[in-house]
Image (cartoon, rainbow, N blue to C red):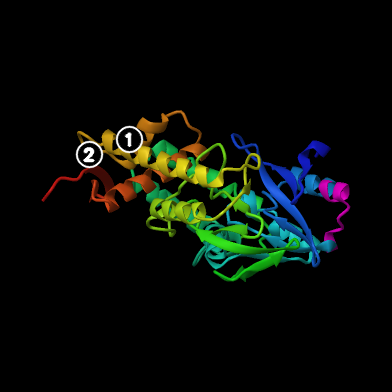
Amino acid sequence: MSKSQVTRYEELTRVKMAMAFPLRWVNSYALRGEEGWTIVDPGPRSAANEAAWNEALDELGIRPREIASIVLTHHHPDHYGLAGWLQQRSGAQVWMSKAASEAAWRNWGGGPGFEGADAGKGFTKASIALYRRHGMAPERLGQLPEHLSGFLEQVEPQPEVSVIEAGLPIRFGGRLWQPVETGGHAEGHLSFYEEETGLILCGDAVLPRISPNISYGPGGDAHPLRSYLDGLRKLGALNAQKAFPGHRDPFENFEGRTRQLLEHHEQRLDRMEELLRGEPRSAYEVCVSLFGDSLGIHQLRFALSETIAHLVELEDRGRVRGEETNERIAFRIATPD
């Protein structure tokens, strides 16, 4: 890692960790407090990122045993992945929400009957079943096992987790933070807000240049877009003055950005409803109409999960209706009974 990957701000230090295109990097943050150093979202595990952390710690003059805590906004591999590796080196406690820790176990720990060497197979099996019901093409379904199994190496070893209690302030990095739990992007996602300064570590709940992916996934939130929109309103009501996100650069006008994201999703709901005028269509067909048919399997999985989330919200609002025939779901415009 070059020195340009470590950026010192007045409030904290950012360390960029490499990840796959198109995001390219995830923001990890280091904060110094009376108890020692705290690392927020250490990034996905890879040999390159292990080396990057070793160089960053040397540059910052941090010995591993000076890391007192590792705080995670959510369970996705690009944020959670190196937590266990860093915990083994430092002895630090790893903190995340109860819902996020359960999602990590469900996705990466295997789920019932899929522990140990079979970790991840339960999530893969459930994902294939979900996407088949929503019309994913067979050749694309065939790409999922290899794709999903690739995440396991990014999250091993998994950490021993301490739970951040909802509604209770937590102190780290010399600051007292209010954890704000929201959903939609990831179950149990936590942002950390310091009321005195208006500083917020917002993870992937609010990003400055892109819309965070809203995922309908197996075993997760049955109404993820509703959860995300409710969370945006909750976050927008804070007096947040400066945001440090999980991706891209720090930004201001946090409340304005939450409003932009709310408007974006209303526009997407309208567009999906329009695509359903005519014959019933599967979520996969709607997804291809919106995002094209040339996406790689990683981006296609995100796009289809987001499409399902929006169609579920339209159904919740009574604007469309999903009908299941022969274990396949198709959506159509709702008509008065």
Q: At which x and y percent is residue 1?
A: 80, 39
Q: Which is nearer the N-term, disc 2 or disc 1?
A: 1
Q: At which x and y percent is residue 248?
A: 63, 39
Q: Is residue 36 left or right of residue 180?
A: right
- Residue 271 circle label: 1
What residue sits 87% from the left and 46% below the top? 59
Q: Is residue 317 left or right of residue 101?
A: left
What residue sits 53% from the left and 57% below the top? 107
Asked whether the residues under the numbered discs 2 and 1 touch, taking CB atoms below 8 Å apart as contact, a structural biologist would say: no
Residue 58 within the segment the image draws in magenta: yes
- Outermost residue, left side: 337
Q: At which x and y percent is residue 42?
A: 70, 52
Question: Alpha-carbon neighbours of circle 1 within 10 Å: few (<14), some, or many (≥20)?
Answer: few
Q: Is residue 158 above or below residue 293?
A: below
Q: Nearer the viewer, residue 100 or 252?
A: 252
Which residues, given as a range, are shown in magenta?
56-65
Q: Nearer the viewer, residue 253 or 226?
A: 253
Check disc 2 and report the residue beneath it: 280
Q: Nearer the viewer, residue 167 or 95?
A: 167
Q: Please state which of the two labelled residues, at mark 2 or mark 1, is closer to the viewer.
A: 1
Residue 154 within the segment the image draws in magenta: no
Which amino acid, mark 2?
A: Pro
Distance (Cα) linking label 2 and label 1:
15 Å
The secondary element bearing badge 2 is classed as: loop
